[in-house]
Image (cartoon, rainbow, N blue to C red):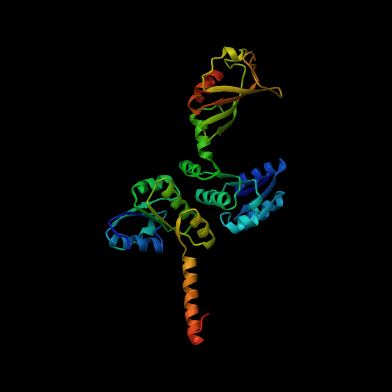
Amino acid sequence: MVSGKLFILVIGCGRLGSHLASQLSRDGHSVVTVDTDPQAFDALSAEYSGFRVEGNAAELAVLRQAQMDKADLVIATTREDNVNLMVAHVARRIFKVPRVLARVFDPKREEIYRELGVDTVCPTTIAANALLAKLAKGDSSAEGGKEL
Amino acid sequence: MKVIVVGGAKIVYFLCRTYISKGHTVVLINRDREECAELARRLKATVVHGDGSDPQILADAGVENADALLAVTPNDEDNLVICEIAARRFRVPRTLALVNDPDNEQIFRELSNTIAFSITHILANLIEQRADFEEITNLLPVGEGKINVTEVGLTEDAPIVGKSLVDISLPENALIAGILRQGDAIIPRGSTVLRAGDQLILMTLPADHGQVLKLLLGDSAQ
């Protein structure tokens, strides 16, 4: 859980972004959500009390409008890996945001960006590991407790 | 020199053609399969179909031994990631990125070894400085736009025609670095007399650019 009351920017209001933004807003944080598609904001829950900024997060002016300079935490969840990586970059280097997280689908890119100090979450790797773990469990029970 | 170019559309075709004609080896990366086929047919270049920000595609294009990489896709985020991966992971000595949103130049400047250029910025500057398109054939911002290198043609009615350089009181921040006269290149001295038809290679700071042009070309440059 995120402790204290923070100013949080959620970039991308898709399934993950809208869910996170709704949850964080419900927890009492100040949240600003950014998406290129105004209809994307419909996915936010009724309790969401934060701001909505319509625009492309790859444009510096949009991030300024969303007040990235004041953010305590930025989470980049658009469906474009490169947009998320760029947003993470800008948040860290230009706006000096203390905590930055980016979702990256491609594990190869995740690896490189981790080397560069960008904190990433890769759903592909997580899902693959979870599936393998389940598989290992299933197999081991089927084979009478033997390790895979 | 081996140059990797990532992107599409006409700019990439003509860019590659220029490089190839200068004897460089060009590898082109493009996302669109049909465009790849077309480019491969028209250019003597290796064309790789794929996403240039995918490290595997860059490796396939032989980025490890490239001397330079140009990222000229219409998306700033793609250009940024491509240059970053090429410079950091593959140690490409020179990376160049097209910046579509001029605001983003600041971001690209922080990248290691990457030179960013913004067409919007260059064109906007041209108009801002009220350049006369007929007389000014080239405007090249050097050092991230801190110095302008301009090629200026002198017409007969330019106020400085017939004067020697010593008699023209150029501002401190301007220099006539070269003269092209009837196919010859001249490095001018104080005694060099300017003639109509001369092409001046002018170096200026952007702040003084308009003033210098006015001095050299008269009010027609305004």
Above or below: residue A116 compared with residue B143: below
Residues B110 and B175: in front is B110
Q: Relative to A71, does residue B216 appear above or below in the rendering?
A: above
- Look at the image and tell me whether residue B134 can be seen: no
Q: Residue A12: in sight, yes or no?
A: yes
Residue B142 falls in image quadrant: top right
Residue at image coords 35%, 47%: A67
Nearer to the camera, A120 or B181: A120
- Left or right for B58, reference A79: right
Q: How many numbered tags mark residues here?
A: 0
Image x and y of residue B163, in percent: 61, 12
Give coordinates of residue B179: x percent, y percent: 65, 22
Q: Is residue A138 left or right of residue B13?
A: left
| Quadrant (top left, top right, bottom left, bottom right) of the N terminus of chain B | top right
* Residue at image coords 54%, 15%: B169
Q: Residue at x 65, y 54 (%)?
A: B61
Measured as percent of width and height from the top left, residue A39 is found at 38, 58
Residue B207, position in %: x, y? 48, 27
Q: Is residue B142 left or right of residue A24?
A: right
